[in-house]
């Protein structure tokens, strides 16, 4: 009989799947709508996903980090979708997004 996953492992698997979908959404924004300010965020989030897949210790802390990052990424997507300026956002907003990515 296979070992049952812990609650933290299940949460980590779930958030990894959610963040993968979010990364795909960001990728569509970059490639289809030519919103190049998000390229760094896509790359950073993909790296974070790779890290999560190899993590062995501190799974609970990693899960918390991933859930917070997922919420922030979804909020950023919402800013783009609801922006009255169309595809372009003000430089101050793009600077805040860049600060998050770093």
Image (cartoon, helix red, strand yellow):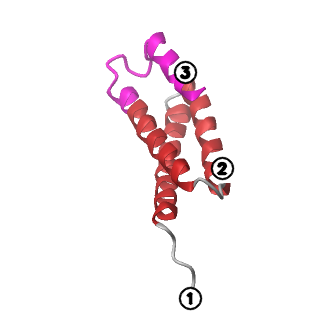
The residue wearing badge 2 is 50
Residue 42: image tag:
none
Of marks 2 and 3, which one's residue comes earlier in the chain?
A: 2
Marks 2 and 1 close (CB-CB < 8 Å): no
Residue 68 position within the rendered picture, expressed as x and y whole percent measured from the top left: 45, 40
Q: Which secondary structure, mark 1? A: loop
The residue wearing badge 3 is 99
Q: Residues within 10 Å of mark 1 (few under 14, many from 20)?
A: few
Most distant residue in the top direction: 91
Residue 17 position within the rendered picture, expressed as x and y whole percent measured from the top left: 50, 56
Magenta stretch: give its range.
78-102
Is the residue 72 above or below the residue 11 in the image?
A: above
Q: Nearer the viewer, residue 39 or 16?
A: 16
In the image, is 8 to the left or to the right of 86? right
The residue wearing badge 1 is 1
Q: Which secondary structure, mark 2? A: helix
Q: Nearer the viewer, residue 87 or 21?
A: 21
> What residue is shown at x 50% (from left), y 23% (from top)?
97
Number of the front mark, 2 or 1: 1
Q: Nearer the viewer, residue 10 or 58?
A: 58
Spatial CA distance of label 2 from label 1 is 28 Å
Of marks 3 and 1, which one's residue comes earlier in the chain?
A: 1
In the image, is 30 to the left or to the right of 79? right
Q: Nearer the viewer, residue 90 or 2?
A: 2
In the image, is 24 to the left or to the right of 50? left
Quadrant showing the N terminus: bottom right
């Amino acid at each position: 009989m296979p070992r049952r996953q812990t609650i933290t492992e299940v949460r980590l698997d779930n958030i990894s799947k959610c963040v993968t979908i979010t990364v795909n959404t960001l990728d569509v924004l970059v490639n289809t709508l030519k919103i190049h300010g998000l390229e760094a965020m896509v790359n950073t989030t993909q790296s974070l996903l790779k890290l999560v897949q190899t993590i062995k210790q501190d799974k609970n802390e990693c899960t918390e980090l991933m859930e917070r990052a997922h919420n922030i990424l979804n909020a950023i997507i919402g800013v783009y979708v609801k922006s009255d300026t169309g595809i372009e956002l003000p430089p101050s907003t793009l600077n805040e997004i860049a600060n998050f990515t770093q």
